[in-house]
Image (cartoon, rainbow, N blue to C red):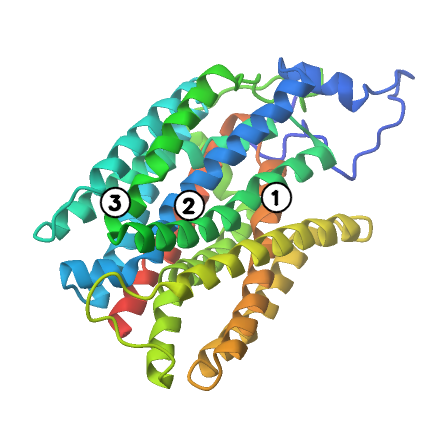
Amino acid sequence: GADVSADTTPFFSDDNEGEGPTDNGVVSPQPEEEESASGVSDRRAKVTVIVLCYINLLNYMDRFTVAGVLPDIEQFFSISDGKSGLLQTVFICSYMFLAPLFGYLGDRCNRKSIMCVGIFFWSLVTLASSFIGKEHFWALLLTRGLVGVGEASYSTIAPTIIADLFIKETRTNMLSIFYFAIPVGSGLGYIVGSKVNDVAGDWHWALRVTPGLGLLAVFLLFFVVQEPKRGAIEARPEHTLHRTSWMMDIKALCRNPSFILSTFGFTTVAFVTGSLALWAPAFLFRAGVFTGEKQPCLKVPCDNSDSVIFGIITVVTGILGVASGVQVSKKLRTRTPRADPLVCAAGLLLAAPFLYLSIMFAQASTVATYVFIFLGETFLSMNWAVVADMLLYVVIPTRRSTAEAFQIVLSHLLGDAISPYLIGVVN
């Protein structure tokens, strides 16, 4: 029998697996038949992905709304870059520390219920954060930290539901659609945040957009999404899924080199994107002030045009990067089983010089800076869907939420939990 504690237990179907007759001459089921094993119809499965994408988009839209109005927040509370950098850091820290709890629950409890409760709580806390006065910056830090509760409940679980609904190339395609929501949501956060701030003349209103949309997400989750059977769609009849203890799950993940190395690689992406996401609009604004193109922000509302432009760049580069990463990986899989990690590594190596050049050209040419940021973000975005797909095919179904949580903790602990604050302090 196979070792149930090992992540190499051969229950999966991957792109390299043959689909011909079995040893007994019985033809393997076609994808349409296999998908019914999840207990969810093909149509409902696709609608589920749309709902999950909508919620993922909301998560990232809320996360980067603050970055879109950061100069206004600094002016309103009269705080330094170091303190404003804490807004992202406290959120990431709570998100990071709660991820293991939700990963544990996600592998053992009803995932739909966990997400409903988490997103409802996130919506209420986000709304509460929009009513904080200028004497209570600590309260804004507290509420931004509590927002991490809702996002941790979702991010550790949603990809595992997609994994239980689809297999092989269909799963890769659905994951790429799901991860399109990250750059699109992030970009919308900058754009909507800055535009609502301009119209209302008050940055607080920027934080009142996503809570209502979050309650709609809870409604859709409750009435539309159906909980699939764990691992049923990819399990072979001769293998049975066994639930193991949390410690056994962690030990197995630590002995899984593909998972560990891809997680460390993704941590570098998190470090760069975390600092870039919070500070790029402010950096571009200050570069404009230095060159004389813009006036300093002496009272709110500030000039947030850079947030809008950076938001548009983030949306476009995210779509291009995720799509190109997935397509290049699919092409290379026919030549090498190491296609996915090679694509991720190439994306990082290509992004580095362009991001460096964007900093060097900031005081000389705004257009050149935007071009280099565009290229750098495109190559960075090649990692999102590919890393997620790697995790799902190297980890068995009963510990995938735990693996998602493990990856979240490590990538944030060494990545975007510290990079926004460090950049703020250096500033």
| Residue under the point 66% across and 53% down | 325
Query: Farthest residue in the top direction?
Result: 39
Residue 256 in view of the camera: no
Q: Quadrant of the N terminus?
A: top right
Residue ID at (23%, 67%): 81
Q: Is residue 259 above or below residue 317?
A: above
Residue under label 2, please give it: 61
**What residue is pinned by disc 1?**
390
Q: Amino acid at mark 3?
A: Arg
* Quadrant holding the C terminus: bottom left
Q: Helix, strand or loop at disc 2?
A: helix
- 252 or 123: nearer the viewer: 123
Residue 348: which numbered mark, if any? none
What residue is drawn where x is 38% and y is 62%?
275
Query: Which badge, 1 or 3, is on the more N-terminal residue?
Result: 3
Looking at the picture, which amino acid does disc 1 mark? Met
Callout 2 amino acid: Met
User: What residue is at 11 percent from the left and 53 percent from the top?
Assistant: 134
For disc 3, the marked residue is 144
